[in-house]
Image (cartoon, coloured by chain):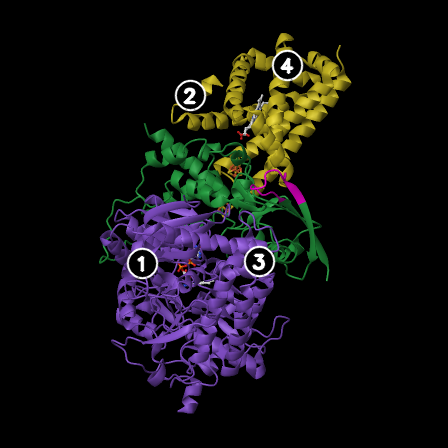
Chain colours: A purple, B green, C yellow
Amino acid sequence: MSNYTTIVSDVLVVGAGLAGERAAIEAASRGLDVIILSLVPPRRSHSTAAQGGCQASLGNCAMGSGDNTDVHFADTVKGSDWGCDQEVARLFVETAPKAVRQMSMWGVPWNRVVGGKKTLPDGREVEDPKEKEGLITARDFGGTAKWRTCYTADGAGHTLQYAVDSVVIKLGITVHDRTEAISLIHDGETCLGVVARCLKTGELRIYLAKSTVIATGGYGRLYGASTNAIINEGNGMSIALNTGLVPLGNMEAVQFHPTGMVPVWILITEGARGDGGYLLDKNHHRFMPDYEPKKKELASRDVVSRRMIQHIRKGHGVDSPYGPHLWLDIRHLGAKHINTNLREIANICKNFNGIDPVNALIPVRPTQHYSMGGVRTNIDGQVYGLKGLFAVGEAACWDLHGFNRLGGNSLAETIVSGWIVGKKMAEYTLGAAELNYQYNNVQGFAKEQQERINNLIAGKQGKENVYALRKEMEQTLMDYVGIFRNGPDLQKAVDNLKEIYHRSLKIGLQSSGKGANPELSTCLRMPGMLRLALCISYGALTRTESRGSHAREDFPKRDDANWLKRTLAYWKEGSDLPDLQYEPVKITELPPGDRGYGESSASSAEGKKQN
Amino acid sequence: MSTRKFSIFRYNPITPEVKPFMQEYTIEEPPGMTIFVALNKIREELDPTLMFDFVCRAAICGSCAMIINGKPRLACKTLTSDLKGTVTLMPLPVFKLIGDLSVDTGTWFRHLSVKTKSWIHSSKEFDPNAPEDRMDNETALEIYEAERCIECGCCIAGCVTANIREDFLGAAGINRVARFMVDPRDERSKEEYFDVIGSDEGAFGCMGLMACDDNCPMQLPLQLQLSFVRRKMVSFGLSIK
Amino acid sequence: MLVQKILTRNPKAELYYDLVELFTGITLVGFLWTHMLFVSTILLGSDLFNTLSKSLDDYYLSYVGIPFIVLVFIMHILSAGRRLPTRYQEQKIIWRHAKMLQGTDTWVWVFQAITGAAIFALASIHMFVVLTGWPITATTSAGRVEAFWWFYLVLLLLGEYHAGFGIYRQFVKWGWFPRKPLGYVSKLITVIILTLGVAALWVFLQLGGA
Ligand SMILES: Cc1cc2nc3c(=O)[nH]c(=O)nc-3n(C[C@H](O)[C@H](O)[C@H](O)COP(=O)(O)OP(=O)(O)OC[C@H]3O[C@@H](n4cnc5c(N)ncnc54)[C@H](O)[C@@H]3O)c2cc1C
Ligand code: HEM
Ligand code: SF4
Ligand code: SF4
Ligand code: FES
């Protein structure tokens, strides 16, 4: 007899962000029975926080004219520092314009081209063509040759998520929110579903499905200072890793966003710089043109972040109780522009810092922002190592982003890969045999989780405090696995994290753990989070080159001869370090070359000196 | 450093024998402390059982609404320095209580979307190779203005009508309908809109007390939207048979 | 409320209720304010008051106007009264809500409902007394006020409160004017009418019944 409620469907999507819901729609519209699990109601997923926009080479606005999928492809590959899978990138850029138009049909009120002359903040005159009036327009984002980032004022992610969720509701797709997947169920070959814990009652449930999709977003909250929502703890990645069969790809590739607002680390969108904002140092000097004469503030994120830290290290930072920072200046954009197109930024500054960006400078510093790495899949979104398991969105390493994601490419990835992977997953499910599982095996997975819970409550393994461990982990990653990395620091990080990991196996609950106890939730996640932290640090320690966001001070150059490959991290049971393997990166169109910006580029100021 | 006293509503449905009560906590108050920071501090240092919800902690996702010193507000963007004396925290009324400060807004708002059929009703088939239909930029901005609602529930919790009538869709619901009415892509007829909201559950249920308008953390122009929908419903209602 | 139950089957019933509430509300406010202006002609002397009363009588305005107002009064009670919470459970919710939430809005509404119910009783008595003492003259009115001044004061305060906030909320609901200036104007008018009303009461008291 089973103690656990068991719920069976054709497809189980873990994660109700943009990627998960988009994939669910593909399956449901082919008549499959779909259930979505989510920590929070779908519309509260982290995707809604994306403010900037979504890349697609529509080329409608004047500054985007001449854009096409080839230009977008080249930007993406360069942005990734040749770390991405070029087949995936090609598929992505070809689909993005269609996906954006589809979103328009589903209700996203994309901003539109308004014909006529206008003056850009830097004084340039442009004229948007009358014949394009009313088509979807775009704004400028870092690392792109054309203006390609489609947007809805300051709420691209919000409107996308609401539109996609409206279709989920229209199709009547079942969503179990406040439900956390805490373990995958598999038989060594095929994924059969998940064990989940209800965050309303604390009850454990078994979900079984022919296909399971991991769409759980990023792991930003492993870091102490992150722009991510507090639920972004990399859950989905860790349950995949825990199987011992599924590898995580390129976990050392962590993106830092140049403009997290000090001290709350809320993101100030790249749109601020795209619309003409400047970065200033303590002397109010605009320093980016000194380093990057061509792209200035709009070089790719990894480059801008490093330039900022470099500039701070030279002593040009503004001192504060929260460490040195720099200024973001958007005052010259004017009150009207700031209060309409950048309203959300204005609100954030007012609410969380008590400043009005119309006449004040915004304190900013590079902050953890995005995880390029994730559950490694093939081009169809199928996870390595287990049949019937798929991954999409930020949780996946489909490998569109390589070692650095371009701003606006990740919202685009969610709707594009959600569509493509959703379709492939639906086809797989339709062709799959009936669910075939061993009762005892399935129950065993749930019992194992129940036992963990019992042990935590009883304090059987020890009495370590989960919040203390968590702080130590966050601090270790911040201090030693940040923007600039080096061997000794990374070694220290690995050693510390190993030690914290062992202690995390001895956590004991302080409270009763009854019901939807929040402390218990954190305790259950903690060892998994530490495994991810170890994958990141150990991967970074081992990769002795600099590529994209992975900047080694002791190995400052990209090393294509040895490192044009993707890290695959496996976790063997009982181990305290990941087992790292590598696979080659697929180069189909654009051979490794110069990015056109960044430290090693011929067009950047230092690059010139070096040449 | 100065300290601050909090008085927090406690009730856990799994232990119904413990009646609801107010519990007091005192913590240090660094400058710039928000209720988000304070509650996490209380949970991590004083009481790991305390239930509350935060997601974005940046006033974007709508998870953290609660009654703060008698007003429905987003806890993540409320600075304690803006409050006087003891900070009293209660869960939002109307919504089902999950425990302590945590309420189930998700189910309520999904019901709202189902009830108001909140999706674009269009007979068009998507053609992946066709360019998008054109739209005036002004129209796009007008839609976005209403679409900015983050489903936080502040307007519902403060609304007398929503507190008496279980089926009242509140300002968020009426605003949602306004969002689709101004959208040229939505092909719904007058009859269909009237059917959705032309009743006391919707437009005519509102009594014009404007607690919603005062409490919306997104500063949505709710009075305008409510009256816009009300007038539209009268003209739709009078013109259909 | 059987009538409502039957009517509610019509999908447009609530629309009609809302319109009736709007028109009767505005008419009653209009009536109340004109009525107060007429009453306060007493400030300018008994002769003017008597002349006005007589001319309204002579031109049959009273005979058309009063039944009309009574009808509107009843219709208003039916349409606006539908919002009154009838069940004990609901009333409890309102009180809890009003106490927990700091905003004034809930109290405004609670008062609106209470004053409405009180006016229903007081205004009916008032009308009955006036109609049975027909015609209206300065002397008869003064007599009534002297005997029941506290009754009139209460009715005046309740009626004005109810009318002032009522009209404000109607306009807000229909969105014809922005909230802030509207609140100002409606408060100003209320204060003027109240002053006139109290002054009129005072004069009547001074006059005394004959
Ligand atoms: C502040 C900010 C701004 C951004 N702006 C932009 C931008 O302008 N342009 C751009 O392209 N990208 C932007 N990004 C990146 C982009 O928003 C994200 O990468 C993207 O939204 C991720 O979508 P997702 O669907 O993969 O995951 P999410 O939206 O993070 O969704 C994850 C879902 O998984 C659920 N979940 C997680 N774990 C579990 C579990 N164990 N069990 C059940 N459910 C679970 C969650 O509840 C959630 O529903 C931004 C990111 C941040 C942090
Ligand atoms: C002097 C006569 C009266 C005047 C001038 C008057 C005026 C108004 C007005 C203008 C409103 C509109 C507010 C609205 O609809 O939202 C209103 C509401 C109301 N009236 Fe009256 N009224 C009078 C008598 C009465 C009586 C006798 C009752 C008896 C029950 C009553 C009960 C109500 C109630 C309960 C409301 C509240 C409706 C709501 O909140 O929407 N009124 N009144
Ligand atoms: S104005 Fe209407 S919707 Fe808003 S609080 Fe009042 S009754 Fe509720
Ligand atoms: S309308 Fe405003 S208060 Fe109401 S749910 Fe939406 S954002 Fe919150
Ligand atoms: S936590 Fe998202 S709005 Fe407060």
- For numbered disc 1, what is the local secondary structure? loop
Which label lies toward us, 4 or 3?
3
Helix, strand or loop: magenta stretch: loop
Residue A287 at x, y = what percent? 50, 79
Residue position marked by numbered label 3 in the rendering: A460
Residue position marked by numbered label 4 in the rendering: C125
Q: Chain of mark 3?
A: A
Under 8 Å from ligand 1: the CB of mark 3? no
Local crowd size for mark 2, using a 10 Å CA cut-off: few (<14), some (14–19), many (≥20): some
Q: Chain of mark 4?
A: C
Q: Are the residues tagged 3 and 2 within 8 Å (C-beta)?
A: no
Q: CA distance from mark 1 to mark 3?
A: 33 Å
Q: Is residue A123 visible?
A: no
Residue position marked by numbered label 1 in the rendering: A190
Q: Chain of mark 1?
A: A
Which label lies toward us, 2 or 4?
2
Task: Out of A479 and A467, give the one closest to the viewer.
Answer: A467
Which label lies toward us, 2 or 1?
1
